Amino acid sequence: MTSLLSLTGIAKTFDNGVKALGPVDLEVQQHEFLSLVGPSGCGKSTALRVIAGLLAPSAGKVEFPGGNPETAFVFQESTLMPWASALDNARLPLDLKGVARAEADMRAGRALERVGLGGFEKSFPRELSGGMKMRVSIARAIAAEPKLLLMDEPFAALDELTRQSLNDDLLKLWCEDKLTVIFVTHSVYESTYLSSRVVVMTPRPGRIAADMALAAPENRDGHYRLSPEFTTQAAKVSAALRNAMVEHA
Amino acid sequence: MSAALKYAVPVALGIAVLALWEFLVRHYDVPVYVLPAPSAIWAALVENFASLMQSLWTTLSVTLEAFALALIGGVAIAVLFSQSRAIERALYPYAVILQVTPVVAITPLILIWVGFDRINLVLVIVAFIVAFFPILSNTTLGLKSTDHNLIDLFRLYGASRRQILMRLQFPTALPNLLGAMKISGGLALIGAVVAEFVAGSGAATGLAWRIVEAGHTLEIAKMFAALALLAALGIAIFSILSLLEWALLHRWHESAIKKTA
Ligand SMILES: Nc1ncnc2c1ncn2[C@@H]1O[C@H](COP(=O)(O)OP(=O)(O)OP(=O)(O)O)[C@@H](O)[C@H]1O
Ligand SMILES: [Mg+2]
């Protein structure tokens, strides 16, 4: 397997002297679903922004051995343009890349359908619920057919039911599109449910405290949430997180 | 409140006030040079219709020219400010100085520099100075209030500065700009009138000068007629700009949502 992303000695110290991250070494394989969990303020968002190329690391290297992958980012808030319809929002990456309008409309429309928003193309963000807005945000992310999907606590602000249904939809997209996902979350259960791999980080500056492989999350559904296997895995992640907090406090 | 009632109430109130005014003036025999009755004002309006319309047009064109310049200049400089902090730091204090200096005090100077033979240009410049600042400061603020995550997203997709400006910063600033336009539209009119009062020579032919003229000859009804036209002009400018604001924002902006609720 070729790795998609390789971080070597990545560290970030902000201008104000805050040591936010690192040093971190991490190899991410293609088609992994990697969750990043860790205490608040440990540098998870910083790590994602460094990987996305939005923030320069103070030390270390970000490399993509197979070439720069098409990358998409989903934030905790849906981060939509309020003046643009769902379709116009989903079309943004294609517009910015100069894809012809007719084709871009078609691809954005299909992305909306895939997240269950067929028929809402013309709706404005203020006419949509929180869960639907997050779906538009995901449609926007997949519209440009990314290889690497970075998500920063995307479902943290949603209610439990909406979150679970979005979890399932996300897994479906991950499976169908052979995505590589790096997913930041505070929820042990969410990370256990979604991931093929969970990376646990220490308190600030965030380093890797544990790196756990889980069974691939293909064909997971509501039953899996109730299975003893799920509970065991969640307990392991939870223990690793507690360890990370204690050892590095 | 139903839509019909929303307009009916203020209109009815206006008619009632006019009727009361008419009645009191007639009943107490108030001399016309103190307070003319609405009917007398209407008569003065009809009698001087041609000259008043001419003046209305003069004032309107000065106002519109100044407003257009303020809009173009204010937005252009705001864009400049949003692209370069250095330019903003260098120029902003001067914009503020221009704003806080009473325009009445600099009008005579502008009059001397531009010349008494180009009085209309003087009026446009003064009205521009008054109308310019709200557009500049509000648009600058709007252009800078973009969602940071959205900017990151644009950068992630390789957007150029121009794309970020046109597709993200302008729409973000639009509510601020439209709000500022409502203020500046009124200010441009005030500027045009004030400048004409100060410039006050026979060369000026706008509504303000009609008021001065009528005052000198104690044609108070004509004075009121000119005043009424000025008020109507102000209301028209404000209404048109409010309509524009509604047309551009009502589908997505919070301010428009609360109004309909
Ligand atoms: N632009 C910045 N300038 C200075 N310090 C920053 C900046 N961004 C983040 N930090 C600091 O870096 C640390 C890590 O921030 P980061 O947002 O990456 O944490 P996080 O793990 O995502 O936290 P959370 O789980 O609460 O989202 C924090 O202490 C934060 O205050
Ligand atoms: Mg974060």
Image: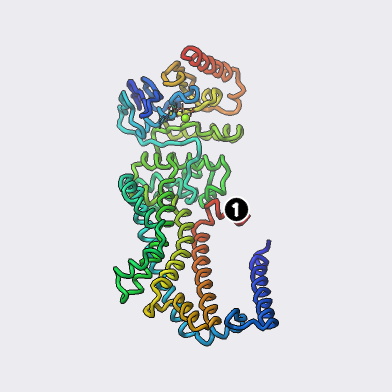
Q: Tell me residue A176's x, y (percent).
A: 46, 34
Question: Which quarter of the image is occupied by the C terminus of chain B?
Answer: bottom right
Tell me which amino acid carries mark 1.
Answer: Lys
Q: Relative to A94, is B174 above or below?
A: below
View extreme (top): residue: A247
The residue lying at 41 percent from left, 61 percent from top is: B102
Q: Tell me residue B247's x, y (percent).
A: 51, 61
The residue lying at 30 percent from left, 25 percent from top is: A61
Q: State left or right for residue B72 relative to residue A212.
A: left
The residue lying at 60 percent from left, 17 percent from top is: A228
Residue nearest the viewer, comparing B215 with B131: B215
Q: Relative to A234, is B41 above or below?
A: below
- Residue topped by disc 1: B258
* Number of callouts: 1
Q: Quadrant of residue B64?
A: bottom left
Q: State left or right for residue A235 relative to residue A96.
A: right
Residue nearest the viewer, comparing B149 with A29: B149
Q: Tell me residue B205's x, y (percent).
A: 41, 79
